[in-house]
Amino acid sequence: MKTTASGVSAPAADQTGAGPATAPSAGAAKETNLLRAFSFSIYATQALVVSYIPLYFLDRGFSAAQIGILYSTGPFISVFANLITGTASDKYRTIKKLLTVLLLGQLVMISLLFTTNSFILVGLIMLAFYFCQTPMNPLSDSLILLSSQYTGRPYALVRIFGSLGSAVCAYAFGLLLKQTGTSAAPFVGMAMIAVSIGFSFLLKDYQGALKKMDFSGFLKLLRKPDTALFFLLVLVISIAHRMYEGFLAVTLRQMGASDSLVGLASMISGFSEIPVLFLLGKYGHKFKELPLLAIASLMYAVRFFLIGKITSPVWVLPLQAMHSVSFGIYFATAVRYLSGIIPDEYRSSGQAVYAVIWSGFAGIISGTVGGAIYDHYGKGAFFHMAAGLALAACAGFLGKHFLRRK
């Protein structure tokens, strides 16, 4: 038996879906449903922030360049926010309390958007908002991973509801804001954040090991060749992913796509990952992580190569369905592999480092270097470079797999 920080004794179980799920008790089933609802709500909020808050700023009179600056603060501040909150979570052995505090911070910041039209003040508000918003995913992932010791439910079968929330609400919010206007976007965001806060109060505060965190031990862990190489490969594939994600809408617009087609493309990618996450939750334990990561990277390369070749925006829709076998496989498998090389007492810090690389460093590099490449060499060279990075990551994951076997 293993004791969680909330005082719940839980049987030792796989945290990631690396083994079959056991039938949970009534209390465990209730907790699983709470985690699923919480995941749904926080990813729904993120769908609003990514898709519709920029339109809110546009209607408030901000230029496209100003909106780009506002959104570039996210990857920058995420580097510090994830490291600070991840370390604090492991040091003080709490995830739930941090999630609640961060959600309260988001609620305050988004409500302040109504108080000013000053670009500088809005920039400071969004900087503080992103400080509270960017650590949500790694912290909630840590909570789900550790909860499976008690609930018996693999990570993927809980996280799948985050994908569902993002896909469903991206479309639903669009229908709502079409009727009300984008001026209502912050109100919708406040409502969803309030719902998330309500769920956060009901969650248990799971933690794995009772050992006090030794930060020097965590640094030694990061310096291990196996761990360092994994994070390096994550950086390579993350840059490629962020290049695609950050410039897809621009590419579609340049090819003559309507706003509804852009929204449809986003919805297809969100829905496509749901069946893959479900299958990985059920059967992922039958496959080794590194070969799966290599397959996902190869699918990324094919996807990026094809987007660099097409000339009609309609062809983007089937390519968006490839999100399932690229991001869907990669994300669940990378989290599963990370849980195997990072001990429980460093769980949140490990997830924070992963998030810093995935959304922070990769976002900064893809936005600056990638943007310059796109402007100077065009769509084809840009996406083919992303495909090359994905192929390099594929080779790295395969090489790492064969080295481990030896």
Image (cartoon, rainbow, N blue to C red):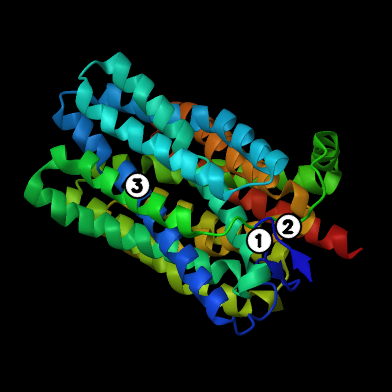
From the viewer's perspective, is 59 left or right of 343? left
Could you tell me the amino acid type at mark 3? Answer: Ile
Q: Position of residue 212 (x, y in %)?
A: 81, 44
Q: Which mark is residue 208?
A: 2
Q: Which tag, 2 or 1, sits closer to the chain's start?
A: 1
The N terminus: image quadrant? bottom right
Q: Secondary structure at mark 3?
A: helix
Are the two marked residues, 2 and 1, in contact with CB atoms closer than 8 angstroms?
yes
Which residue matches tag 1? 146
Q: Position of residue 160 (x, y in %)?
A: 47, 67
Residue occupying image coordinates x 50% and y 35%:
363
Name, please, the residue furthest toward the right: 406
Could you tell me the amino acid type at mark 2? Answer: Gly
Considering depth in this image, is 10 or 374 the residue closer to the camera?
10
Q: Which mark is residue 320?
A: none
Q: Secondary structure at mark 1?
A: helix
Q: Quadrant of residue 265?
A: bottom left
Q: CA distance from mark 3 to mark 2?
A: 27 Å
From the viewer's perspective, is 242 left or right of 253? right
Residue occupying image coordinates x 27% and y 17%:
119
Which residue matches tag 3? 193
Mark 3 packing: few (<14 Cα in 10 Å), some, or many (20+)? many
Q: Position of residue 30 (x, y in %)?
A: 49, 73
Q: Secondary structure at mark 2?
A: loop
Q: Which tag, 3 or 1, sits closer to the chain's start?
A: 1
Q: CA distance from mark 2 to mark 1?
A: 6 Å
